[in-house]
């Protein structure tokens, strides 16, 4: 890793995350009000969605966009199988919990993506704006695969009807807000965005700092209370993002994406959902244990991705594309 | 002196994502209404939780006032959810004014 | 063993803009105190409401612990509000510790 | 309507409102925490108040200001009579509810005004800063007229004492914050405002986007739950803002206001309160049905004004003043 | 018909900074869980308070469902805090479903 | 006092505070949601911490920093003795309450400090960035002195164990956030700060406006409800900040601090905590009456410092250093 990796660790965004983790471990009472945290998460999604839409309105839609979309959706469908096998075999989880956890690893984490974009931009490798749409498209397929794995094909379990379930999944607030803001970005374009950019653009990194402070607090507190997560599961929570990240990045480079977009796709593959999917699992697989899937995705994979894996994936993408040679 | 009648007060602790299932059950029991109040944190067999609004796994209380028979019908109706989703249901007798509303 | 006494617990669901009328009534009944807790949403004869803090038409619970006689005086006092404003009042017996405070 | 009307529909401010409406109709669970929504509404009032005050500190107070103030106050007093007649006759409401609804249409909606100012500024017709004071002055008179109509002169009804009522009305939070911030704007002037303009000015449109997203959600959800509103009432909720808008704009042009201010006054006349007046009605006319007045003002009139009527009023003001000819 | 059992419901009004002491006491009493709900404002012998989250002197309710004996053990255990810190404790009998959990 | 003192009263920051006080006295229902207020207070601490850290990363650490730190810590330890004597003698408080109140006056108010920095910057006398660290260091010692005075040496009272207590005090959220953000500022430096300065820097004064609006409302409402505060205690709540401010400023000038830093240290000495210390007192001295200590520090001393004492201290520092002569 080069100087830019170190630069990551002097970025306030990452440092506030570390501060949150340390404060929680020191048992400080520091806490962000829930309403504020929720508001910040909506803000981040609206802002990233709009920025992506504006970028696409500038660049237009080309073959790369479709490649990335197809790759992302396919990955989201397929990745849970690999995770499921690991979770049942090495992780010793039952079918139900293995399926629930697998869904998380096939889906994506918005905040991990947003943080990766910040880091990639600092490193001079900004991903394409269309990656936001790829992210939104990757949220859902993994949920379907995970449910199928958990319940077996055909059976319905104690949860809700499939129609209700699909509605939940396609109209859940993060998908609606991401895609809605993305569409707004496309329609209003750079000119329309200019009006609101002091809010959505200029404030973005600062809000991300405070939001990551909160996520650091929550992730660390959860692991301090955790009981359900064995060392085997902890190892999986590191191994899966590593492997998924390598596969995602390599496939993206092979299919011709630029270095930033390939890294972003790698990060999406590596990231695990801790917002949309847990909520969907409570509805569809209430018997699965949130103590397992939330702790793995939020308290282990999320910090691992933020602090280490994004840097690794970025370096990998650079190496594979040979992009590191040029000026940033 | 003002007149009061006895009704059941039922309080159900539920995931906020599942409120609609509970209120649908209340409507099915033909109870006149319900009220939702927020919850901050808690601990149960599945460990502690708090500040989970961002994750969408937070909880709320749904409370409803109903005559005995409708209350029992409601309890009967949502008993399966209690088991699968780990809801908490408590109920007790209260005096209400203007009992004809409930 | 610790000693407990029986008191009435009264809970009144009211518009947050009208809290002062309820707490004034509590003060008039010479009850020692009250506590206000938030409410998120609800449904009654007038339909559903939620997220109405911006509109200032949101609701809260006011709860107060009082001896039987004061509780009845309070109920008597605010009964008209119950009818005109659609408040909800429930009350029941609770055990309290350090009953001399109430 | 010209290109500028179309431009309105590519503005993120309007698009986020539409997104909110669509998300609610699609039964998405998207929701802004109440505390955040309340905070944004306070922010918008503080910001619009300050901006108005700063503008007045620059321009000074002239005859136009007094004309606009007088016209606004008179309109707020008088408009409920017209609405009341329609509501009782065509709308078939009883006296109590007709009076309560009429009060809403005489009063004003801060967010409609704010959105109109944004649109008028995009179209190159900024209203005078003093219009904020006109808005604040228009909030209250209609409440008095509406109460009088509902209760009849003299009788007091089951509500509170008139003194208490007047206090509520004159010191309600939006009047206090608008006029307070207006006064602060006047006292601190452009120089003082410069210190805080990154917050109050630069962030304004972005906050308005998110706030309108929320209003779209709330307005659409309310109409989906609505039972009390007949087609007659729905028709009135469109007709009254149309007529009031035309009358207000024409009178303002006739009395010599500039195009932007005349349009703004028209919008104020057309707008219906859904913050200050509903709260006052719950206090003073608790027997009136919020299901009627909130649904009409918030779910029908408000979107109609935002999406259509502001554009019409702006075009009318331009036509009447002949301002459209020159460069914007 | 669905089966219910009788349990004690205990609600304790406490400073939010002191929640941990209350929940520690609940854990000591070997009660299976607890739930914390928010409080907006109140009045007692020490006057009114509200909007004190910034000052960190705000309050919450801690509620727990427990069998009679554990409930009394808990009340005994935290009685001293009631006196020194002005906590409020009320408890009453409720019916619960799936009573084996408590 | 010169023109700059008047300038203070045309600053929106101060005017919003006055608006809050007036609105509360007029019994308006204006109120900021608690979650928003809490969020703003966290924002202000993160921002002031970071700004201080960045300033120190530029200027480095010299003898002045150590002087100021030493002086601040000593003052925080010692000042409660003086306040305690006054509170027991003239104020007629019992030992318990006198100790609790004294702790507040030895500690500091973050918002008073932040407001003073804004005013000093307007006046062209910016304090050194390291003063943030001094502030954080001054929060705690006074709590220890106050407890010792209240309980007598050795005894433990009805509160918690001393270990628990010390943990609370050193890891309370404001200390952690201030020092954490300070460290982040040092590590990320001016370059890292540039990324987030639109959020932490540009928005700062505006947020401070709304926060002070809220503090004005809360301070005035509390005094309207107050019963426990006698005129003697009210007089002490004015006298102590006056005296502490003069002593602190003089000592700082004597020890060679620049005019801005000396004034800032004077303000820290003059200010009384109403966040960290009340919370600590509820834990450690639950029998003490919050009606006394909160009303004194929040409703009397805080407004007195904001509206009058900061101006006096600034003038004193200027006079003592002879800095007023040169260009700002
Ligand atoms: N049976 C009920 N149980 C619980 N809450 C109710 C009930 N009926 C009404 N409410 C609450 O009281 C409010 C006003 O009811 P209403 O006056 O019937 O519209 C509703 O919005 C609910 O929050
Ligand atoms: N009779 C009561 N009913 C309900 N809540 C009370 C009552 N008395 C006191 N409280 C609550 O307990 C808090 C502390 O009371 P105190 O210790 O008397 O100041 C008050 O602020 C109220 O929130
Ligand atoms: N004994 C109890 N008393 C009060 N609340 C409880 C109790 N047990 C569980 N809860 C609440 O119910 C939630 C789910 O419990 P569980 O299904 O046991 O994990 C917990 O997070 C608590 O909020
Ligand atoms: Na993934
Ligand atoms: Na109007
Ligand atoms: Na001090």
Image (tube, coloured by chain):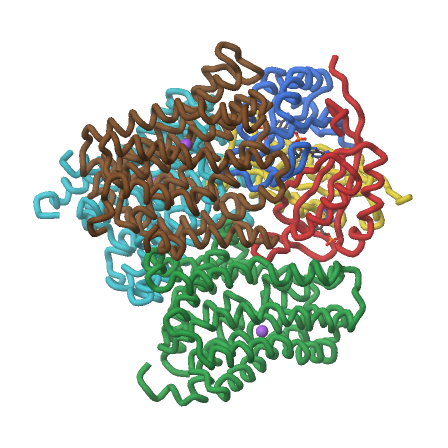
Chain colours: A brown, B blue, C yellow, D cyan, E red, F green
Q: Residue E18: where, in percent of width, then height?
A: 69, 51
Q: Residue furthest top?
A: A154
Nearer to the camera, A203 or F239: A203
Is residue A121 placed above or below B68 in the rendered structure?
below
Q: Residue furthest right?
A: C1
> In the image, is B47 to the left or to the right of D43?
right
> Which quadrant of the figure contains the N terminus of chain D?
top left
Q: Residue at x 39, y 22 (%)?
A: A77
Q: Residue E43: where, in percent of width, then height?
A: 69, 51
Q: Residue D18: where, in percent of width, then height?
A: 32, 32
Quadrant of residue A141 within the rendered picture: top left
Q: Image quadrant of ligand 6?
A: bottom right
Q: Is residue A32 visible?
A: yes
Quadrant of residue A72 within the rendered picture: top left
Nearer to the camera, B38 or D6: B38
Is residue A199 placed above or below D188 in the rendered structure?
above
Q: Residue at x 53, y 76 (%)?
A: F69
> In the image, is B28 to the left or to the right of F311?
right
Q: Residue D154: where, in percent of width, then height?
A: 52, 41
Nearer to the camera, D8 or E81: E81
Q: Residue at x 45, y 48 (%)?
A: A212
Q: Is residue D84 visible?
A: no
The number of callouts visible is 0
Nearer to the camera, A66 or D107: A66
């Amino acid at each position: 890793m080069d100087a830019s990796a170190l630069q990551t660790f002097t970025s306030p965004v990452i440092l506030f995350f570390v501060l949150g983790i340390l404060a929680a471990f020191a048992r400080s009472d520091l806490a962000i009000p829930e309403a504020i945290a929720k508001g910040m998460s909506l803000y981040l999604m609206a802002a990233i969605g709009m920025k992506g839409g504006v970028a696409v309105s500038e660049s237009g839609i080309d073959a790369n966009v479709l490649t990335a979309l197809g790759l992302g959706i396919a990955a989201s469908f397929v990745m849970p199988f690999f995770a499921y096998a690991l979770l049942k075999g090495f992780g010793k989880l039952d079918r139900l919990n293995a399926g629930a956890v697998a869904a998380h690893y096939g889906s994506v984490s918005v905040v991990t993506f947003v943080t990766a974009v910040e880091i990639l931009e600092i490193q001079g490798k900004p991903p394409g704006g269309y990656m936001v749409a790829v992210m939104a498209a990757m949220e859902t397929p993994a949920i379907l695969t995970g449910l199928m794995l958990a319940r077996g094909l055909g059976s319905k379990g104690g949860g809700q009807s499939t129609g209700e379930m699909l509605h939940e999944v396609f109209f859940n607030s993060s998908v609606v807000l991401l895609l809605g803001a993305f569409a707004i970005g496309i329609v209003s374009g750079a000119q329309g965005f200019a009006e609101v950019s002091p809010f959505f653009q200029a404030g973005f990194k600062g809000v991300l700092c405070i939001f990551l402070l909160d996520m650091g607090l929550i992730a660390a507190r959860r692991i301090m209370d955790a009981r359900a997560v064995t060392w085997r599961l902890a190892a999986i929570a590191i191994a899966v993002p590593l492997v998924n990240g390598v596969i995602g990045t390599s496939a993206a480079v092979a299919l011709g994406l630029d270095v930033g977009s390939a890294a972003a796709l790698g990060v999406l593959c590596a990231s695990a959902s801790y917002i949309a999917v847990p909520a969907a699992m409570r509805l569809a697989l209430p018997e699965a244990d949130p103590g397992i899937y939330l702790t793995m995705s939020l308290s282990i994979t999320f910090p691992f991705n933020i602090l280490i894996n994004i840097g690794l994936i970025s370096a990998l993408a650079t190496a594979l594309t040979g992009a590191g040679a040029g000026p940033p | 002196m003002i007149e009061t009648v006895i009704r059941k007060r039922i309080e159900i602790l539920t995931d906020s994502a599942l409120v609609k299932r509970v209120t649908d059950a209340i409507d099915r029991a033909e109870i006149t209404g319900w009220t939702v109040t927020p919850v901050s944190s808690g601990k149960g067999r599945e460990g502690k939780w708090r500040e989970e609004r961002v994750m969408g796994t937070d909880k709320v209380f749904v409370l409803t006032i109903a005559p005995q028979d409708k209350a029992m019908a409601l309890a009967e109706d949502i008993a399966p959810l209690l088991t699968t989703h780990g809801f908490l249901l408590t109920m007790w007798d209260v005096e209400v004014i203007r009992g004809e509303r409930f």
